[in-house]
Image (cartoon, helix red, strand yellow):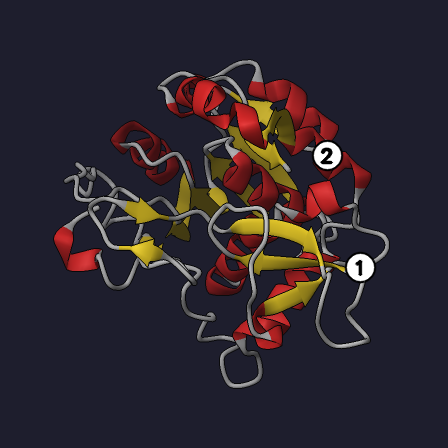
Amino acid sequence: MPASEWDSMRAPFQEGAFPFPVKYGYCAVGRVESGPDDLLGRHVFCLHPHQERFVVPRSRLTPVPDDVPPRRAILAANMETALNAHWDAGSGPADRIVIVGGGVLGLLTAWLAAGLPGAEVTLVDVEPGRRVQAEALGLRFALPDSAPQDADLVFHASASAEGLATAIGCAGQEARIVEMSWYGEGTVAVPLGCAFHARRLQLVSSQVGTVSATRRARWNHARRARAAMALLADDRLDALITLEIPFGDAPAALPAVLAPGWPGLTAVLRY
């Protein structure tokens, strides 16, 4: 975490400060035990560090609809990021769309794209095993060497220089590449030579902290959060949760999850 971003990257209700010690993490789903009558007993989502109980203002809660299981509702923050990226991108029906990077964010972005009528959506990843998740969500899959070209729109979510180069190579004439990756304080090589200028490509950033300019006049964060939560009402999205860890086992289990090469997607801490 670069020092210049210590303030902007603070999580809601964070305790401590970067670089360490810090109490971070933010995808919490729980049941309201005390509060307004209309919320008592309901499941809610909150951006809050990991702990068994917490007290927050009602305005920071997003109710979980009856058709979204609490376990799946933890994906709401990533879904919100994917939704915002599509607003930034200007995705449309019948577009040829490529998503480079098959982690949770890339898969959710691709799933949203696949819902556009007539859209041709391909997920590109270096891990052949991602084909299983892609096909479960109704997506095409390709390894980088066989990634489609001449795309109308490309999303990059691999957080690697190689992935960004692949994304640029997939883009067609005057296409837009939406960069969703977070690189921390690293410097990333970007291939802006060759045909980048001749093809008049656009490279734009997307970040969830601010509602996309295309919606900002009418949408606030709460409305966007509710919309993202409602989008989770699809049983196929359970495939994005690949490990469940009892909270008491977290100290022993998390190092493997955080290590390079962990093959899973989302790990749930169960209280």
Label 1: which residue?
65
Amino acid type assigned to the residue bearing label 1 in the image: Pro
Q: Residue 9 or 190: which is nearer the viewer? A: 9
Q: Residue 165 or 259: which is nearer the viewer? A: 259
Amino acid type assigned to the residue bearing label 2 in the image: Asp
Q: Position of residue 233 (x, y in %)?
A: 79, 50
Specify the quadrant of the image occupied by residue 258: top left
Q: Quadrant of the C terminus?
A: top right
Query: Would residue 205 be found to the left or right of residue 58 on screen?
Result: left
Cα separation between marks 2 and 1 = 16 Å
Label 2: which residue?
238
Q: Is residue 172 above or below residue 38?
A: above
Query: Would residue 37 be found to the left or right of residue 146 on screen?
Result: right
Query: Would residue 32 be found to the left or right of residue 256 on screen?
Result: right
Q: Residue 37 or 19: which is nearer the viewer? A: 37
Residue 92 visible in the shown view: no
Q: Earlier in the sequence, mark 2 or mark 1?
A: 1
